[in-house]
């Protein structure tokens, strides 16, 4: 959270003197951190840099501290001009500390690793209070009342949050419990469900405070499982029933910029009005759905990073309008735990709060102690064609996924992974009982089987590669590797199988099925008044029954894949048809089929048209 209050509370002079003397003796001997609660991730990385007393609690993740001692001499004398602005200490006209004053009053301190709801008017927030902001503040005040002696710990003494509220030190704030043990105040806020997980990484040069990431994540997951605080249904007001799922694609195949996205899925058989609903990350980047936005039954929308018009590159897409990249890519070899999350809040008309209830959330990566997935052993990687005959192209490369069970399986929320990057399966993807799904690396029109990644150049390396089936919080389901790559530490259902060894069926051939018409030829398309007129020649005779009908199917070309949009039909003697209105200025691909008594035959070669 990013608001703070500058109100000063009077501190008992005797208590201030006792605390100052005690903490000075503890710290002047060196930088060895004092004993405290153990952490799941590198607790030794945090040092106690400053000690002091609580002046006030601004909100659920920000306090004002009167600093009495500091282990870093450069922090107090000379007092850095940037850090100086984080405190309310009076300075002399020359910018130095008064000679009779050796402490710093009213220093703003941001608790690292947690994100509490914003209070009304907070910098970076909104004019309305976010639901549970007052409860988060009260939870922190309960463990850090005015006058409490505290230690300020961090990995880096210069860790700050300079973006909001005129700057704050970034620290873990410790207080002493009844037994005298030093306790992390952030734990109480998270355990009560009053804050979201807000991890940092080494790449965060301003505040690389990652020591508590895994510990805090487990506290948040536990609070969510118990349904307390933010995670309690209906706390902020009565909400209409809705079945909503969400997940993050943090590392899409290709360029991450402007392609990372959050999926919001309506997992019900009724349309869902999401007018005014909010989607956000763990920081302060948010998106609010426009009034009138409805997600169809079992349908989804995507909110992509970066700026852009709604409906691009596909009609299901919106944009956060913020940074081109928001979500860090998880690297299991990093040596520490980090990640991010996405949160979906509903809207409560007439509510005094900026957001409504939290309806869905998603954290990644998975907790390393609980990284299993229910599909492991049930859905496996089958044949992998990484070296097709002739010149390698994406069109000849594919990977197959096989359902080994007698029950259909949804692959919504799962992805094909290659060396860490992810191709998420369309949310409606279902793998039938005992069925096989082929994912082609090439360009094509998605059907129930196959799906297309949308590449033109070869992707899978002949010399060696690493492929996985994963869920989107990076829990592996199955793995295949060859060359110098390895599946060590991941589930492996079997050996790498190539198409020849597996006797896999050849990719679907573009030819007429038995007793059905051949493909029409000489297909062309023209546009006028936002409509497309399609013309073609009759298919060559192939000994089948006569043609009774034609159908022209129109797909939107997004540059990566083709998305079906509409079709038009014509009787057997009419070799043209006209579509309904399409999007002006967009490029579409048209294919034509002929039909007889046995059904539709093969598609024609495609024609391309730009709508005028």
Image (cartoon, rainbow, N blue to C red):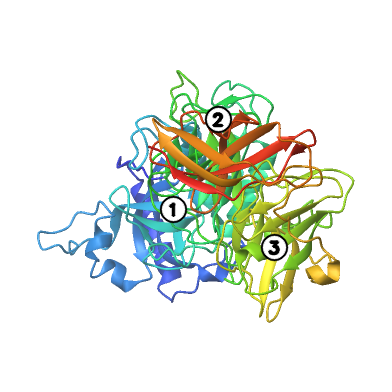
> How far is mark 3 from mark 1, CA to CA?
26 Å
Q: Give the label on residue 357, or none.
A: 2
Q: Quadrant of residue 409?
A: top right
Q: Which residue is mark 1?
A: 258
Task: Name above or below for residue 182 compared with residue 247.
Answer: below
The residue most toward the right is 406
- Residue in the picture at 47% in, 30% down: 355
Residue 67 visible at all: yes
The percent coordinates of residue 254 (x first, y second) are: 51, 62
Q: Mark 1 or mark 3, which is nearer the start of the sequence? A: 1
Q: Mark 2 or mark 1, which is nearer the start of the sequence? A: 1
The residue most toward the left is 93
Task: Name above or below for residue 152 compared with residue 408.
Answer: below
Q: Which residue is mark 3?
A: 398
Q: Secondary structure at mark 2?
A: loop
Q: Mark 3 or mark 2, which is nearer the start of the sequence? A: 2
Seen from the viewer's position, the closer of residues 363 and 485 is: 485
Q: Are marks 1 and 2 in contact (CB under 8 Å)?
A: no
The percent coordinates of residue 405 (x first, y second) are: 88, 49
Q: Nearer the viewer, mark 2 or mark 3?
A: 3
Q: Nearer the viewer, mark 1 or mark 2?
A: 1
The percent coordinates of residue 292 (x first, y second) are: 47, 24
């Amino acid at each position: 959270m990013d608001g703070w209050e500058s109100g000063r509370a009077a501190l008992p002079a005797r208590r201030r003197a006792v605390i100052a003397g005690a903490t000075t003796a503890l710290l002047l001997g060196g930088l060895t951190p004092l004993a405290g609660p153990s952490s799941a991730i590198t607790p030794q990385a945090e040092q106690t840099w400053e000690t002091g007393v609580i002046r006030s609690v601004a909100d659920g993740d920000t306090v004002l501290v009167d600093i009495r001692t500091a282990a870093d001499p450069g922090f107090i004398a000379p007092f850095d001009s940037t850090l100086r602005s984080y405190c309310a200490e009076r300075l002399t006209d020359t910018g130095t500390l008064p000679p009779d004053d050796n402490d710093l009053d009213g220093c703003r301190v941001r608790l690292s690793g947690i994100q509490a709801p914003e209070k009304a008017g907070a910098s970076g927030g909104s004019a309305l209070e976010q639901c549970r902001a007052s409860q988060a503040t009260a939870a922190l005040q309960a463990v850090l009342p005015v006058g409490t002696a505290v230690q300020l710990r961090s990995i880096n003494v210069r860790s700050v949050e300079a973006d909001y509220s005129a700057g704050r030190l970034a620290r873990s704030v410790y207080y002493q419990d009844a037994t005298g043990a030093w306790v992390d105040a952030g734990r109480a806020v998270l355990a009560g469900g009053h804050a979201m997980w807000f991890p940092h990484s080494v790449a965060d040069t301003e505040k690389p405070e990652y020591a508590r990431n895994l510990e805090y994540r487990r506290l948040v997951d536990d609070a969510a499982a118990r349904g307390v605080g933010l995670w309690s249904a209906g706390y902020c007001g009565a909400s209409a029933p809705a079945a909503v799922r969400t997940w993050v694609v943090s590392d899409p195949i290709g360029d991450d910029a402007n392609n990372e996205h959050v999926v919001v899925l309506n997992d019900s058989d009724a349309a869902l009005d999401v007018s005014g609903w909010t989607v956000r990350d763990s920081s302060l980047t948010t998106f609010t759905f426009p009034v009138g936005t409805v997600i169809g039954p079992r349908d989804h929308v995507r909110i992509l990073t970066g700026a852009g018009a709604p409906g691009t590159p596909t009609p299901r897409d919106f944009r956060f309008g913020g940074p081109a990249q928001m979500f860090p890519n998880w690297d299991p070899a990093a040596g520490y735990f980090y990640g991010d999350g996405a949160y979906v809040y509903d809207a409560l008309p007439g509510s005094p709060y900026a957001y409504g209830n939290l309806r869905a959330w998603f954290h990644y990566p998975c907790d390393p102690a609980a990284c299993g997935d229910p599909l492991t052993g049930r859905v496996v990687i089958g044949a992998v064609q990484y070296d097709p005959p002739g010149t390698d192209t994406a069109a000849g490369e594919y990977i197959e996924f096989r359902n080994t069970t007698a029950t259909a399986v949804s692959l919504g929320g799962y992805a094909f992974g290659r060396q860490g990057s992810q191709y998420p399966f369309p949310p409606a993807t279902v793998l039938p009982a005992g069925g096989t799904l082929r994912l082609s690396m090439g360009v094509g029109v998605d059907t129930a089987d196959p799906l297309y990644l949308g590449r033109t150049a070869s992707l899978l390396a002949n010399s060696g590669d690493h492929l996985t089936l994963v869920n989107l919080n990076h829990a592996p389901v199955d793995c295949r590797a060859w060359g110098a790559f390895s599946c060590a530490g991941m589930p492996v259902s079997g050996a790498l199988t190539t198409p020849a060894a597996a006797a896999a069926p050849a990719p679907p051939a573009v030819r007429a099925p038995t007793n059905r018409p051949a493909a029409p030829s000489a297909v062309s398309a023209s546009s006028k008044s936002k409509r497309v007129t399609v013309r073609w020649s009759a298919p060559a005779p192939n000994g089948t029954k006569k043609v009774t009908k034609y159908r022209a199917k129109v797909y939107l070309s997004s540059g990566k894949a083709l998305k079906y949009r509409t079709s038009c039909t014509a009787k057997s003697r009419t070799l043209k048809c006209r579509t309904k209105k399409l999007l002006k200025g967009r490029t579409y691909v048209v294919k034509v089929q002929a039909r007889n008594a046995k059904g539709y035959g093969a598609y024609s070669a495609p024609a391309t048209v730009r709508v005028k």
